[in-house]
Image (cartoon, grey):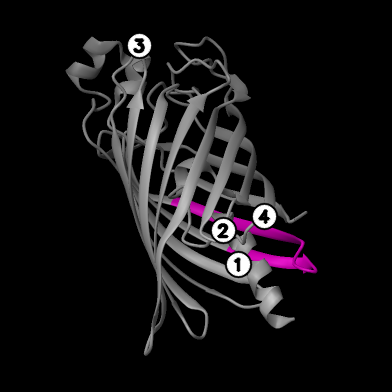
Amino acid sequence: MLRKSKKSLLGAMALLCLSAPLAAQTEVSGFYPQKNELTIAPSYSFKQYDRFYRGTELTDGNPAGLGEISSYIVNLYSEYGITNWLSASLNMPYIFIESETGEPDPVQGTSSVDGIQDLSVFLKGRILEKDIQSLGKLGLGAAVGASIPVGNYEPEGVLSLGNNANTLNANVMAQLTTKVNFFTELQYGYSLKDNSDFDVPNAMVYGIKLGYFNNYFYTHVQLAVQDSMDGLDIGTPEFAEAGGPRALPETEVDYTNLNVNLYIPVYKNEIGVSTAYNQNLDGRNFSKETSFSLGLVYKPL
């Protein structure tokens, strides 16, 4: 019974990487569901900022002087175990974003924007799993995925829902789990981005995660970094020449993000709740934002 309970908990843990806002962390985890195991995780997130990195300089406000900006995100994420070593996942967020002062976006001409953002689909596979006598279990895995804009949203302006780019992603991850259920995960990913109207920079995403789990809860702390390969800096002559706020999809967006996540099963490991806190510690052409998330994890299969 204990073994079955632990497997169910591990299956739910595989989804927690996207129960928080999308920009917060790497998009897949080093845990894998069992064959034919389906888990569905809807979540609600709130994030806010009133400071912004113009280039690498942290300033009050945002690039268009809109004051404090808030985002409300309803996210649906699910994962299905095709085999014990291969899974498929799907993610789609609905976002409402607004200027708290009511000032309109200089490009979009409105103080609030809402809609579905991008549909993301991933295949994740375990390449190797090996028992290390003195330490625990080492797992190596890889994932490939794509993100496609489905909401027909406007990529220009401060209140945009995203950069409206088609994205191809590749990730590799290594996870060491000790015999007492502490784990460490390292991950590296690369994103190729394509938008027919803008030169959206490609980016590397990498991070480290430290966590612990038992039959009663799961928790982790993660440090995630995005490093864009090129792009414009807000406030430079090149940015102004490219169109100012209209050129925001072409900026070099970097960030360092801290994420803390907690999951608790509440009914037979079939239903659980998750909560997360995120804070951007550093950035480039990115907001100095914090966010909170609350999610439901449901395992019908």
* Left or right: 232, with 274 as reference point: left
Q: In the rendered image, which residue does mark 3 sit on?
A: 197
- CB under 8 Å between callouts 1 and 2? yes
Tell me which segment is drawn in magenta.
262-279
Task: Name the amino acid type tagged 2.
Answer: Ala
Front residue of this view, candidates 36 and 22: 36
Point 48% across, 24% down: residue: 66
* Left or right: 180, with 34 as reference point: left
Q: Secondary structure at mark 4?
A: loop
Point 30% across, 37% down: residue: 203
Task: Name the amino acid type tagged 3.
Answer: Asp
Q: CA distance from mark 2 to mark 3?
A: 36 Å
Task: Name the amino acid type tagged 1.
Answer: Leu
Give the number of marks. 4
The answer to whether residue 142 of the structure is visible from this angle is yes
Q: In the rendered image, which residue does mark 4 sit on?
A: 36
Task: Name the amino acid type tagged 4.
Answer: Asn
The stretch drawn in magenta includes residue 109: no
Disc number placed over residue 14 in the picture, else none: 2
